[in-house]
Amino acid sequence: MWKSWKFWLVMSGVVTVVGVLAYGFTVNPKFVKSPLLNGPAPNFTITRLGGGETLTLSELKGTPVLLNFWASWCLACRDEAHVLQAAHKLYEEGQGRLRVLGIAIQDTPEKSMAFARAFGKTYFLALDNVAGDISLSYGLYGVPETFFIDAQGIIRFKHVGAVTPQLVRNNLATLLAPNDEGKQ
């Protein structure tokens, strides 16, 4: 049995499968690089929650975008709600240097609006469609996930999980730095 080439062929197959599975279980999706990084952000058109205003991502070319996917049923989304609202207040309303967009997935308009009111979200919020076309085009693992898109429409950073003030500050400092150089 040990000397049979068939035995060794089967054993090498088993070892390969076990090795691939073992590696897969050690990889945290938070640290898997997105194939979208350093490429153009997929375009989309969204309609503001609670109103008829529409927005197309390509209309924002020339302005960096912080794009967050969230849901009312997501516990981690509650943790990051104040961080995103603070970024909106400082960088969008305060400085006019950034757009913050939030797209709720697998949610209802009523629950999304209730969540937005409860957490004081005032930036542009919308729902993905029932098929999840926008979240699929961005390759979402789940929610929350946040994409930092530069002024040329290129995805520069992606974060899986709740964002922190430091993570937002660090990524926006890099994202907004070319704008600072251009103004000097």
Image (cartoon, helix red, strand yellow):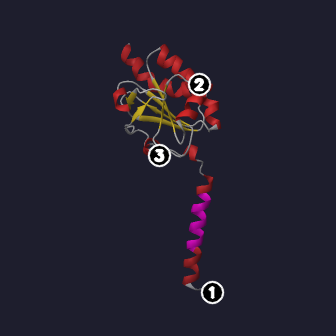
Q: Which range is magenta?
A: 12-23
> Label 3: which residue?
139
Q: Is residue 165 visible?
A: no
Residue 38 colored in magenta in the image: no
Mark 1 closeness class: few <14, some 14–19, many ≥20 residues within 10 Å: few
Tell me the quarter of the image containing the N terminus. bottom right
Report the front residue among 120 and 15. 120
Residue at the spot 63% in from the left edge and 84% down from the top edge: 2
Query: Mark 2 to mark 1: distance in Å?
Result: 69 Å
Observer-side mark, 3 or 2, equals 2
> Label 1: which residue?
1
Query: Mark 3 to mark 1: distance in Å?
Result: 47 Å
Tell me residue 177's x, y (percent): 44, 22
> Label 2: which residue?
117
- Say which label, 3 or 2, has the lower sequence index: 2
Tell me residue 102's x, y (percent): 50, 31
Tell me residue 147's x, y (percent): 48, 35
Query: Mark 3 to mark 2: distance in Å?
Result: 28 Å
- Asked whether disc 2 touches disc 1, contact meaning CB atoms under 8 Å apart, the reply is no
